[in-house]
Image (cartoon, rainbow, N blue to C red):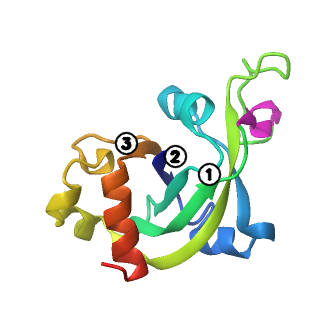
Amino acid sequence: MQYWLMKSEPDEVSMDDVMASPNRTTAWFGVRNYQARNFMRDAMREGDGVLFYHSSCAQPGIAGLARIVSQPYPDASQFDPVSPYYDPKASPEQPRWISIDVQGTHKTRLLPLAELRSIPELAEMVVLQKGSRLSITPVTPDQWRYIEALLTGAA
């Protein structure tokens, strides 16, 4: 089992949106960075843990816990000319971008970026590194356990 931090802009898809969706599940689509796409395509597996992170908002931070619940599949938005995620170089025969389904497991209190930065045990998290802008980053098992305990009250 692996662990991931996945960023979403809450005005696009928030943790509340995920928890209100059927089966608390949403398609993770619109990823247009090759490294993040490769994580989804090559490394993510059903059952992997996800830290659901709100980004590009007034107070960015971890808003809940989730898990991967599908295999990767072609992102339909790449084929839709009216989508902001349209890619004219993609075709159904040769898709360039993929989606993966994420299921919310726990909505938690917001764990703000500023608080994450203040925790020495989390100093090596990729999201906290200078210049880190990827929408999907790996999380170590120790980082996952620390954050999970902090957010679920087991700490």
The residue under label 1 is 47
Left/right of residue 62 with respect to residue 125 in the rendered view:
right
Residue 82 versus residue 102: which sits nearer the camera? 102
Tags 2 and 1 touching, CB below 8 Å? yes
State the separation of the CA atoms marked 1 and 3. 25 Å
Q: Name the residue type under label 1.
A: Gly
Q: Name the residue type under label 3.
A: Arg
Indicate whether 11 appears above or below 36: below
Residue at 72 percent of width and 17 percent of height: 89
Residue 151 versus residue 141: which sits nearer the camera? 141
| Number of the label disc, if any, that sits on residue 133 | 3
Residue at 80 percent of width and 38 percent of height: 76
Whether residue 123 is in magenta: the answer is no
- Span of residues in magenta: 72-81
Q: Which sits earlier in the primary sequence, circle 1 or circle 3?
A: 1
Q: Badge 1: how crowded within 10 Å, few (<14), some, or many (20+)?
A: some
Residue at 57 percent of width and 32 percent of height: 37
Q: Name the residue type under label 2.
A: Met
Please tell me whether mark 3 sits on a helix, a strand or a loop.
Answer: loop
